[in-house]
Image (cartoon, coloured by chain):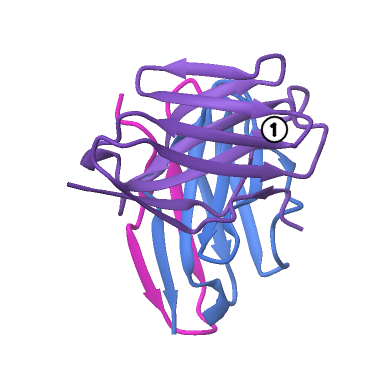
Amino acid sequence: DAGVIQSPRHEVTEMGQEVTLRCKPISGHDYLFWYRQTMMRGLELLIYFNNNVPIDDSGMPEDRFSAKMPNASFSTLKIQPSEPRDSAVYFCASSSLGYSPLHFGNGTRLTVT
Amino acid sequence: DQQVKQNSPSLSVQEGRISILNCDYTNSMFDYFLWYKKYPAEGPTFLISISSIKDKNEDGRFTVFLNKSAKHLSLHIVPSQPGDSAVYFCAATRYNTDKLIFGTGTRLQVFP
């Protein structure tokens, strides 16, 4: 099992540019979560999917953020336009049950200049 | 509104001693709690959990204690080892929801 795979590992972009983060969950996991880690707020839940359907996006900070899960093996988190305050580490996680231990990817470190 | 709080951003402990990491929560509806460990440049990994019907759960060197009346839980590591040096996140959820709410983390450093 390869685990949760995220790409890219690092992303540096200029303010105003579009950023797309990608995630491949563990096969057979029905839940997929996107988290953002910052020093001030720790790990914040942005959005999660169950069987490819978005269930709760109340953590998405603004309309500039959007997430999709077109199939069971792929999800994207898009920021358009990006701003310096979006700089953080973004994690994708999957699980077989909603509250069962999450399996995290290694994250994408986003820097917006 | 931070529902799960880890008020100590860092902790330094000597090898062989006990490490105690603390976590407080505000939502009395939470009934399942977890601890995750995170090494640099890696994602968090699950460490140990506890249900609200228990007040203690033990797994090897790791023990989690839950005090529901105080809305407080703690993670004890005995004995602490240098490989335990990492950031520890406390998390909470409710059985009938799928959302896991994390705290801000505590960085543990175990020195020889």
Residue A78 is drawn in which quadrant?
bottom right
Badge 1 amino acid:
Thr
Marker count (numbered): 1
Residue A69 is drawn in which quadrant?
top right
Label 1 crowd bin: few (<14), some (14–19), many (20+), radius 10 Å: many
Residue A27 lies in magenta, yes or no? yes
Determine which residue is flagged by label 1: B93
Q: Give the range drawn in magenta.
A: A1-29
From the viewer's perspective, is residue B3 above or below residue A1? below
Q: Position of residue B106 (x, y in %)?
A: 47, 52
Split into 4 quadrants, where in the image is the C terminus of chain A? bottom left
Q: Relative to A38, is A3 on the left or the right? A: left
Colour of chain B in the image: purple
Front-most of B106 and B29?
Answer: B106
Chain corresponding to blue in the figure: A
Disc 1: host chain: B
